[in-house]
Image (cartoon, coloured by chain):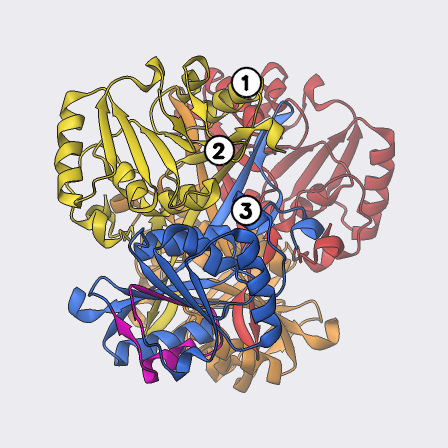
Chain colours: A orange, B red, C blue, D yellow
Amino acid sequence: MGHIYDIDFHFPPILKKLKRGPQIILPKDLGIIAAFSGMNRDSIVIDAGTGSGYAAIFFATIAKKVITYEIREDFVNLAKSNIARSGLKNIILRQKDIFEGIKEKADIIILDLPNPEKIFKAKFRLRSDDSCIVVYLPNIEQVKTFVSVAEHAGFEAFVVRCFIEDLLVREIGTRPKNIGLTHTAYLIFARNKSNN
Amino acid sequence: MGHIYDIDFHFPPILKKLKRGPQIILPKDLGIIAAFSGMNRDSIVIDAGTGSGYAAIFFATIAKKVITYEIREDFVNLAKSNIARSGLKNIILRQKDIFEGIKEKADIIILDLPNPEKIFKAKFRLRSDDSCIVVYLPNIEQVKTFVSVAEHAGFEAFVVRCFIEDLLVREIGTRPKNIGLTHTAYLIFARNKSNN
Amino acid sequence: MGHIYDIDFHFPPILKKLKRGPQIILPKDLGIIAAFSGMNRDSIVIDAGTGSGYAAIFFATIAKKVITYEIREDFVNLAKSNIARSGLKNIILRQKDIFEGIKEKADIIILDLPNPEKIFKAKFRLRSDDSCIVVYLPNIEQVKTFVSVAEHAGFEAFVVRCFIEDLLVREIGTRPKNIGLTHTAYLIFARNKSNN
Amino acid sequence: MGHIYDIDFHFPPILKKLKRGPQIILPKDLGIIAAFSGMNRDSIVIDAGTGSGYAAIFFATIAKKVITYEIREDFVNLAKSNIARSGLKNIILRQKDIFEGIKEKADIIILDLPNPEKIFKAKFRLRSDDSCIVVYLPNIEQVKTFVSVAEHAGFEAFVVRCFIEDLLVREIGTRPKNIGLTHTAYLIFARNKSNN
């Protein structure tokens, strides 16, 4: 997509060396996920679906440990290869359906797969009231479904979109870029209501 | 500002417990700075000016070490108190003008102060070609000056703004918020040209 | 709202002298409605609900004739007073439910009221295949309902939102305004499918 | 551009039948110009440069009379052909430099050409204090120059950009379009200061 439309997605160095596969979460959204969830050096992060592994690798550059779930074998293989390229040692890749349940306690659970609201019927444990479930969903109907199920499960959710505008600073004049990425997905951040 | 305009800046838990002082960099911009600069668990981050310490504290939740410079004594005191509240041990706070020179090699230098282009006349060292100088500037004239000086110093810079749109998901209907934050500052990311 | 948040809605002179009442369509959206619908000196425009009459008055400065429907008596009185102030003679104000049917053929029908999709069960006639039904709706659920009913009625619809960013050009620096209006409503433009 | 990037610029019927030539002002910006300037059935509009005539034709569907200036012979010929296609009779096309002076009094003067601030050294007359000079400029440096010269000439100016976000409403889900037009130009509206 970047090449066709000449849009720069501003990949940090570690993500530039990976092989692309299925649609990825772009750095702009990864940065907002990290900042709004409070991801940090001590975080245990659970991530699904892995896809090409971009998100898991990005989170693993920040967090203590990332456990990432993927059911498709081809994606598992691509992700394995990308994790190897990244050199990171704090990623555990599981070929398994995350909705079958997560053993480890998590600070942040990030869901980039269809029907993420199924998490509320699955077994999962959060480490604290600050812990956060983050969901990446392109369509508004999906957002509504997730928010509704999350609220029934005792969670409070807010929903944002992130836009990046590129400003061209050149001798011939300064102006925003003419064509840009206007939508990737909605980001939902859900925390336990007792936290508020 | 959040209260007057009823705008939620989506502070992560660690920043919520700090005392506000001078204008801070908001989480949306902190997240983009972290993601686009490639900030990670191994990063040595240099930050100036410290102000209330919000940015330094945020970066220290991700990076290995943050060295933060501030010349105003009142801000140094506020920042000290906030750093203590945060419980973080990897922040070094210096009451000193960063443009007098930085001893340590840095992966990322983040400048949120007037005339950040003075860095190119100061002593500083970057750890690698992936290293990055990040600048936070509200006005376009400031951006142009920095980019021009950076390019003469052999750096390549890109400039972005980050917008966050909040989507309200409610029984009575789903829609974006009516009033929002439309501008904080431009973010400039400058890397050595040899890197490209 | 303009005073509380210090947001300039850029009213043209004729709208500045009117009395405010119920929520109005702002000039930014009126301009997009006019341009995208193809409103012109020969247009017969049907408008409902009248509210304070701002939209009807704006359209009447462009179109040949505006027929505007309102059921609430207090709004009818406010609109009458505003139409008198405007000095315009090409507005017909009817205290009547538009969904009871429109006698006149219209080039453009503009609906700013709840359940605008009821128009497709009402009697109305369009003057040509270029004719257009324009709908102003704040919430996405409302938009979906209207688009779905319009498509079943043989119409093709597109949906847009309009943002205006104010750039402050001052001696102390040039930058976008910090706080702004981020959402008013979605604008739907529906034309007969045979037109495409 | 529309075809390459699959962006719909939402042309109204009358503009759809014209021949493209030099870069045009898009309907979104034409609508904002009309609404914010207060263009109406009684307006005398002066427009330069004509280019392909799109803007002059759009304004002539609203205003009483449009006088449009263009110096390039090829554009004059293209504009003549487009004006003929439009069927409009209230456009006067002059192959002449607008900065040599305008005889007629104008309600709105719209400048889409380089160095529009030269208007303040040219002969022009506005019909009232509500009259307005509108300028279309892609770059911020150009905006600053125009605003500065306008203010020295006793005018008060505000500057805006207009974005249109397209919402896709489909069975498979509702979401904003992924790629869109993010910048065309800044629109400046300058009125005599005595008006405020």
Nearer to me, A148 or B71: A148
Q: Mark 1, residues whose alpha carbon is within 10 Å: few (<14), some, or many (≥20)?
A: some
Residue D159 among those drawn in magenta: no
Indicate whether D81 appears above or below C146: above
State the mark number for residue D153. 1
Q: Secondary structure at mark 2?
A: loop
The image quarter containing residue D44 is top left
What range of the chain is rendered magenta?
C104-126
Check disc 3 and report the residue beneath it.
C11
Amino acid residing under circle 2: Ser
Viewer-nearest of discs 3 and 2: 2
Whether D141 is drawn above or below A176: the answer is: above
Element marked by disc 1? loop
Q: Disc 2 sits on a residue from what chain?
A: D
As measured in the structure, the alpha-carbon distance from the residue carrying label 3 to the one carrying label 2 is 13 Å
> Could you tell me if the residues under marks 3 and 1 are in contact, i.e. CB atoms within 8 Å?
no
Dot 1 amino acid type: Ala
Circles 1, 2 touching at the beta carbon (< 8 Å): no
The answer as to whether the residues below labels 3 and 1 share one chain is: no
- Residues at marks 3 and 2 touching, judged by CB atoms closer than 8 Å: no
Q: Sequence-wise, which precedes: disc 1 or disc 2?
A: 2
**From this viewpoint, is residue C123 visible?**
yes
Q: Are discs 3 and 2 located on one and the same chain?
A: no
- Number of the label disc, if any, that sits on residue D131: 2
Place of residue D192 in the rendered image (x, y in percent of width and height, measured from the top left):
56, 27
Which quadrant of the rendered structure holds the C terminus of chain B? top left
Question: Which residue is rendered at x = 44% and y = 70% of the image?
Answer: A140
